[in-house]
Image (spheres, grey):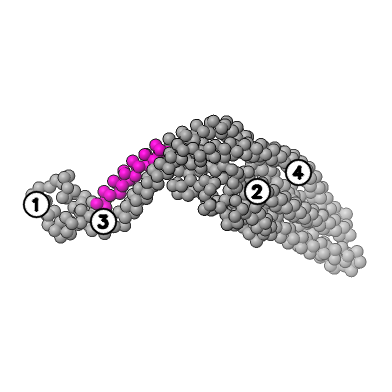
Amino acid sequence: MWTGQQILQSIDQAVASAKLNVESCDKSLSQLTHQVADNLREQGRILKRLAALRFDDQEGEPINDIMDAADKSARKLMRFRKDALADLEFAIHNKRQALEALQASRAEQLAQVDEHNQRLADKEAKTQSRLENNHNYQEQLSVTKTADATAEHAEEKAELAEQDRQIKGKPFEADPLFMYLWRRHYGQLHYSAWGLTRRLDQWVARLCHYDQARVSYWTLQELPKRLHAHAQILREQANTELVTLQVLERMMAQEHGVMEAKSALLEEQAKLSALDEQIEQAEHELAKMTNECARFYAGDDDYYRQAIDEIARSMEGQSVAELYELANRTYTKEDDELVAALVDLREEQQDLQADITQSQERQRYRHERQHELEQLRQRFCRQGYDDFRSSFASGDLINAALNEFLGGLLSAGALWKTVERYQRYRDVGAWPDFGSGGLGKQTAKRRESGWHWPDFKLPRSGGTHSRGRSNERFRSSNDSGQFRTGGGF
């Protein structure tokens, strides 16, 4: 059995692995984009050399001037790009340090919350133990359970009658003659008609056997109303008994310091929630910056595109085509070597572009994996799964699922379902649904009980029976004293 904090550490390790994968991909992509820029500059250098060889000064100078200007402009843009990227990386570094500090503070605050949680659980366990041996309380608990069960049974009967009305009422409602007379209140006190109209209604009533059908339909309509009214009376009576039970609980809880311990815990939990909000905001800001940085690594930023466009435009036009033609007409060794080198560079450029396209897809995928893991971590904490009462039946399986997710074999939704499936409630000596905590049809009534409920939800037992520590129905099959949640999240 793993604790919630151990699972959170596993998730943190998976996030760290995802970040390493992203950084490796970003580094590889950055190298490829620099190689493309170097390749294009080298093509420009060769073209300038060809121009110097094949043209006289009057013809060659304009070509070299164009390429020199493009090269200078591209180098200037790349210097600006380097500075912008350095500033962005520095901001990311600072944001990561701030986030790490927040996460360290959260770990310390979580330890404080756990300490207060255990203190409260000890006081609640002592209170519940006293109540289990208190005759007045047990008598009131029995009365309240009976009233609650009676009210719930009446509510179920009312719901069934309502469903019965909808199903059995359809044949009546499908008969236009019957519904015509029913809407006119025929055969009832509200019916009002004279002369020919009354005689016609009597004729229609004989046609559709209205008198017999009216009694059945009226019963279908009236029974759910009366049952709901009766159930409401019983629920009010049950709530009255429940309030009496809760008064006894609060009196005993006050005597053992439960209220003070709960108040102190709530203060610590509020601090933890504030840190969670700060962490979520910091992660959001960091994600924006890392996405922008990823655009630089992928060569998708304005500086890089403008620099590449400058070089590419300088190599377009008729003058460059003439260089190729003149070089092919000659048989000098240097011309041949330059043209061969240019061909190789063009082929290398195409290969590099193909590699960049593949790396960009891989980069997007890995960034998505990292983001999804970070969201899962946030959700894990928001659900309170790192609460000291939370445990997991099979940490090894969750670790395996995390590895499968990193390997692309599992979706984020399937990973979360795996986490939910193995989450359990750990017995810490006190149960939140002890006594009034497990009674009452209305959730608000349960929350008014003196017991502390964890941030994560517990399975409901239907509201008629308290799941005390002695109730073996809720123990897990491994007989380890742990309790299953039943997946009720």
Q: Mostly what secondary structure, the magenta segment?
A: helix
- The crowding category of the residue bearing disc 3, from other C-alpha atoms within 10 Å (few below 14, some 14 to 19, many at least 20), is some
- The crowding category of the residue bearing disc 2, from other C-alpha atoms within 10 Å (few below 14, some 14 to 19, many at least 20), is many
Q: Are marks 1 and 2 in contact (CB under 8 Å)?
A: no
Residue 400 in percent (x, y) is at 67, 58
- The residue at the point 63 percent across, 43 percent down is 388
Residue 363 in percent (x, y) is at 70, 55
Above or below, comparing residue 273 to residue 318 in the picture: above
Numbered disc 2: secondary structure? strand
**Residue type at mark 1?**
Leu
Please state the extent of the stretch shown in magenta in the rendering: 219-242
Q: Residue at label 2?
A: 3
Q: Residue at label 4?
A: 89
**Residue type at mark 4?**
Glu
- The residue at the point 60 percent across, 38 percent down is 122
Earlier sequence position, callout 2 versus callout 3: 2
Numbered disc 4: secondary structure? helix
Q: Are marks 4 and 1 in contact (CB under 8 Å)?
A: no
Relative side of 38 to 231, left or right: right
**Residue type at mark 3?**
Glu
Q: Residue at label 3?
A: 173
Say if the magenta span includes residue 228: yes
Q: Are marks 2 and 3 in contact (CB under 8 Å)?
A: no
Earlier sequence position, callout 1 versus callout 2: 2
Relative side of 117 to 173, left or right: right
Q: Which mark is residue 196?
A: 1
Above or below, comparing residue 314 to residue 242 in the picture: below
- The residue at the point 15 percent across, 60 percent down is 207
Q: Nearer the viewer, residue 399 or 484?
A: 484
Residue 379 in percent (x, y) is at 60, 47
Which of discs 3 and 4 lies nearer the camera? The answer is 3
